[in-house]
Amino acid sequence: MHHHHYGSTGQLAEWGSRAGGYIIDYLIFGGPVFVLYILMIILSSSGSSGAALFGVLLMLIGAAISIAGGLWICYQEGTTGQSIGKRQMGIRLVGAQTGQPIGFGMAFVRKIAHVADSFLCYLGFLWPLWDERKQTFADKICNTIVVRA
């Protein structure tokens, strides 16, 4: 028997689409942070304490950007079901029961739950490849699914 996994919510997103969405989101927020980090290393190695201090400041700015970016993605995914990356890939995060966006709080919890995905050598992120509902561990904890938008 071949199961088409159509829920009341439509078709589940393929792993490749999800991975693509993550990469896009990561590059948008990780890119600037990486540049600031490189600048910091260059400034720190220049030897002057003023430059080193400025380098540390840049790193803090970088950390703030990545935290703000993460929260913004949670807000986007929670309220619309789509981060920039997910929108580009044409997929959406919804509650498995409701088929509706899950709200900021739940999206935030799910991001934290993604830490569980990265333990076990990132097994959780690969889990959707063979999982019947294509869920990561974070999806299971929060009862969410990612569907084609």
Image (cartoon, rainbow, N blue to C red):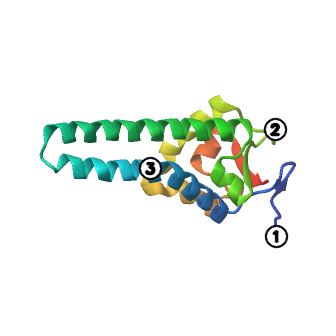
| SS at mark 2 in the image | loop
57 versus 21 height, above or below: above
**Residue 133 on image: x %, y %:** 71, 55
Task: Out of 125 and 39, give the one closest to the viewer.
Answer: 39
Tally the marks: 3
Q: Which circle's residue, 2 or 1, is located before the other in the chain?
A: 1
- Are the two marked residues, 2 and 1, in contact with CB atoms closer than 8 angstroms? no
Q: Residue at x 69, y 59 (%)?
A: 89
Q: Is residue 41 left or right of residue 149?
A: left
Neighbourhood count class around disc 1 (C-alpha, 10 Å): few under 14, some 14–19, many 20 upward? few
Neighbourhood count class around disc 2 (C-alpha, 10 Å): few under 14, some 14–19, many 20 upward? few
Residue 32 got which mark? 3
Q: Residue at x 69, y 57 (%)?
A: 88
**Residue 113 on image: x %, y %:** 54, 40
The quarter of the rendered structure image containing the N terminus is: bottom right
**Residue 29 on image: x %, y %:** 50, 48
Q: Amino acid at mark 3?
A: Pro
117 versus 143 height, above or below: below
Q: Compute the Cα span from label 3 to label 1.
A: 45 Å
Q: Residue at x 14, y 38 (%)?
A: 49
Task: Out of 26 and 48, give the one closest to the viewer.
Answer: 48
Looking at this view, name the residue that lies furthest to the bottom.
1
Looking at this view, name the residue that lies furthest to the top.
105
| SS at mark 1 in the image | loop
Q: Which residue is mark 2?
A: 98
Residue 2 got which mark? 1
Q: Nearer the viewer, mark 2 or mark 3?
A: 3
